[in-house]
Image (tube, rainbow, N blue to C red):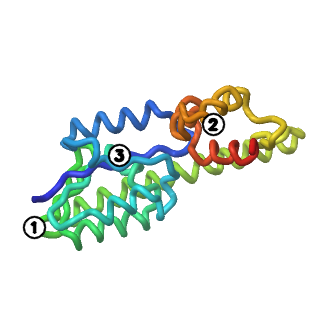
Amino acid sequence: MPKIYGYARCSTNESKQDINRQKRELKKLGVKEEKNIFWEYESGTKFDRAEFQKLLDVLSQGDTIITTEVSRLTRSTKHLCDIMQLVQDKKLKLIIGSFVIDCRKDEIDPMTKGMLMMWGVFSEMERDIISKRVKSGIENAKAKGKKIGRPKVDASNLPDKFLKYYPMYKNGSMNITDIANVLKCSRTTIYKYIRLME
């Protein structure tokens, strides 16, 4: 029996609200079960995203992948071409918002493929423009003598909020995920704080 899977992605600097909005939209688009939604906070330029790779590993012929925008799948035109080849090879159905590419019986027609590639090009251009603006802003800030980036965290300046919840982690009333959710950061960051603390 073919299955329907959803994929949601935010860059690491985006909000929890945005990924939840994507999940709600995926359910409206046809993903019935929450467990079939693969989601992560990763850059759209990375090819080896953990959850995206897990999704690719579970796909079988006739399955459907749903995502809200092409930029959620990837911000690289080359990677988009690879994804389209996979959709054709595995005879999948790909839904991007209201745009449907159905390869379960035959190949993508040239017009549909062309439109999708154009989306990919525009998504990649948008990412490049943003990247250049950020780099320009950093160079300007450096020229004015401003320090760039987050201050280095060590044992002497761990966040107060972490110090507040650390005893609860030690006594077992909170786990790593609980603290990460409260501090609105990744589990990796919490592991780093614990290593510094201990």
Q: Image point 52% across, 34% down: which residue?
A: 178
Q: Nearer the viewer, mark 3 or mark 2?
A: 2
The amino acid pointed to by label 1 is Lys
The amino acid pointed to by label 2 is Lys
Determine which residue is flagged by label 1: 105
Local packing at callout 2 (Cα closer than 10 Å; few below 14, some 14-19, many 20+) is few
User: Do residues under tags 3 and 1 come within 8 Å of each other at their CB atoms?
Assistant: no
Q: CA distance from mark 3 to mark 2?
A: 42 Å
Tell me the SS state at disc 3.
Answer: loop
**Mark 3 or mark 1: which comes first in sequence?**
3
User: Do residues under tags 3 and 2 come within 8 Å of each other at their CB atoms?
Assistant: no
The amino acid pointed to by label 3 is Glu
| Foreground residue among 108 and 5 | 5
Q: Position of residue 124 (x, y in %)?
A: 48, 55
Q: CA distance from mark 2 to mark 1?
A: 56 Å
Q: CA distance from mark 3 to mark 1?
A: 24 Å
Tell me the SS state at disc 1.
Answer: loop
Determine which residue is flagged by label 3: 69
Q: Position of residue 184 (x, y in %)?
A: 57, 33
Residue lying furthest front: 171
Compared across the picture, whether 155 is left or right of 124 comes to: right
| Foreground residue among 71 and 2 | 2
Q: Position of residue 48 (x, y in %)?
A: 48, 64
Q: Position of residue 164 (x, y in %)?
A: 68, 26
